Amino acid sequence: MITPEDVEFHPVENGSQIWAETNFFGFYNAEEHLNIGVYALFRPQLGVVHSTISMNDHDAHEPWRANFFDHRAHLPIPEPQRLSDYSLLNGLHITCTEPNMNWHIEYDDSAGTTIDVEYRALMQPYDIADPDMDPITAARAKEEGFAWGEAYNGHFDQTGHYTGEVVIRGRRIPIDCVSTMDHSWGPRAERGAPNMSWLHAHVDDNYAVHAIWSWDHTGETDELSLNHGYAMVDGQAYGLAAGSGRTTRDEHLYARDVELQVTDSRGEVHELRGTGLTRFPWQAWPNMVGFNVLARWTVNGREGYGELQDFVETTHLAALADRDTTASAV
């Protein structure tokens, strides 16, 4: 169960040198196909934070081909260390105005690119580790749990409404959308994380589906395996009890077409079809690429938007490229 205190930093367990806390705020302008990500990964025991600000509305196969990408690796964590109100040297300022429910997101790169957006939660935080909330966690209570292991010892996802404006070197784009944020804490190494497809589809303030899947980057199968998720209906999150899906990817691993069927804790079935609109290789942290796509969705016949973040480690990508190169040389 998530409590108001979870908005702040958590105690580092066993003096872990790889402990991390993260905040992600993702939002978009559907008409412009502009997808925006604001991310911070804190290493409180080291006193540093890794932060990325990304904005993209097209096919950007390299990070520098996006509309905007600011990637900082070793920013100092301001003292006193607070997640509810922090300002970083990259120009990012996050203020939580109601614990785990409402945030103000500001950014200014001092070169003409800014963010001024309010986030208002449409549901309570969804704790993927709470068996009373998550049916899959309850079913796996005596098993190993979520595939990403200790990095997600603490984790919640939440759908909310974003309003405000971003400016990209003088170009003003309004923001008025429903999207999903998250917050994680736990030991997080920079190598050894399994693949993850973190995705969501938002119809309106009253209906959205969010899910976390495992996927295969080798192309041997396009099928997905459900780990966690929820359907938000009229402000209530109903945990996903079962689901199946498949993703058709292009040669660069970006999702182009997605088909999902999930069943929530009430037995209600949600059928989703997604079409990728953009491409962006989000380098969320060292050794990791998130093949990021803004998608147009239909959810039980209703149109919506949301993103897919398909994560795979660069070591796996290098092995895959080496395999293909070796095969072509034979």
Image: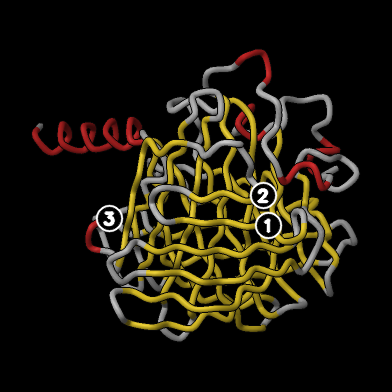
Residue type, numbered disc 1: Cys
- Tell me, for residue 48, which label it has, or none: none
Tag 2 residue: 84
Query: From the viewer's perspective, is 317 left or right of 16?
Result: left
Query: From the viewer's perspective, is 288 left or right of 206?
Result: left
Query: From the viewer's perspective, is 172 left or right of 296?
Result: left
Work out whether mark 3 precedes mark 1 in sequence or the reverse, and give the earlier one.
Answer: 3
**Are dots 1 and 2 in contact, CB under 8 Å?**
yes
Please tell me whether residue 188 is drawn above or below residue 73 in the rendered image.
Answer: above
What residue appears at the point 61 percent right and 63 percent down from the top-left corner? 200
- As measured in the structure, the alpha-carbon distance from the residue carrying label 2 to the one carrying label 3 is 29 Å
Q: Secondary structure at mark 3?
A: helix
What residue appears at the point 40 percent right and 73 percent down from the top-left corner? 277
- Tell me, for residue 63, which label it has, or none: 3
Residue type, numbered disc 3: Pro
Work out whether mark 1 precedes mark 2 in sequence or the reverse, and give the earlier one.
Answer: 2
Front position among marks 2 and 3: 2
Query: Looking at the rendering, in which quadrant would you find the N terminus?
Result: top right
Residue type, numbered disc 2: Ser
Query: Looking at the rendering, in which quadrant would you find the C terminus?
Result: top left
Identity of the residue furthest to the front in this view: 79
Residue 192: x and y, percent?
A: 47, 25
